[in-house]
Image (cartoon, grey):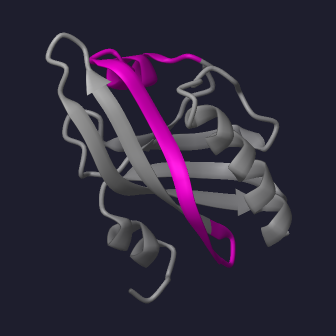
Amino acid sequence: MAEDAVAAIRRVYDEWGRGNWRPRWEIYADDMEWGWSDEFPGLAGVYHDPAERNERLREWLSPWEHWRCEAEDFVVKGEYVVALCRYRGTGKGSGAVVDEEGAHLWQLRGGKVIRLVVYADRAKALAEAGVAV
């Protein structure tokens, strides 16, 4: 399952790396929960949110002229896949450039993603998955 899951998740990052945040992926379970860790004040929280383009994602993307997320590596541990990511963006108006490391913690069950949490700190995401840091 791990290889199939990583291959499916890698396709998501292919689009996110282009700045395409619109698709709803087949690997997502109907009752999937997603959100941000407590490292993101004002956005923190993980919720069931079935809308393809929902308010929380729009809120995150709205101050950015361009926002991309690329997976640099994947760590698999049981039902978890930790994507070690690079976030890149350019602020609207300010032109501020961001190029930072981060991580996404994907939890799968039955070959479907049931939970996705965005982290700024890779070590926190790895620890949450039970990977010794």
Q: Percent from the top left, x then y, of residue 130?
A: 49, 82
Q: Is residue 94 above or below residue 29?
A: above
Dividing the picture into quadrants, the one containing residue 36 is top left
Q: Percent from the top left, x then y, of residue 54?
A: 50, 18
**Magenta stretch, residue numbers:** 53-80
Residue ranking furthest to the top:
93
Q: Residue at x 26, y 51 (%)?
A: 38
Q: Percent from the top left, x then y, of residue 35?
A: 44, 41
Residue ranking furthest to the bottom:
132
Dividing the picture into quadrants, the one containing residue 21 is top right
Q: Is residue 84 left or right of residue 7?
A: left
Q: Residue at x 57, y 34 (%)?
A: 16
Q: Residue at x 30, y 50 (%)?
A: 100
Dividing the picture into quadrants, the one containing residue 75 is bottom right
Residue 109 seen in render: no
Magenta stretch: residue 58 in it? yes
Q: Is residue 34 above or below residue 6?
A: above
Q: Is residue 37 left or right of residue 41?
A: right
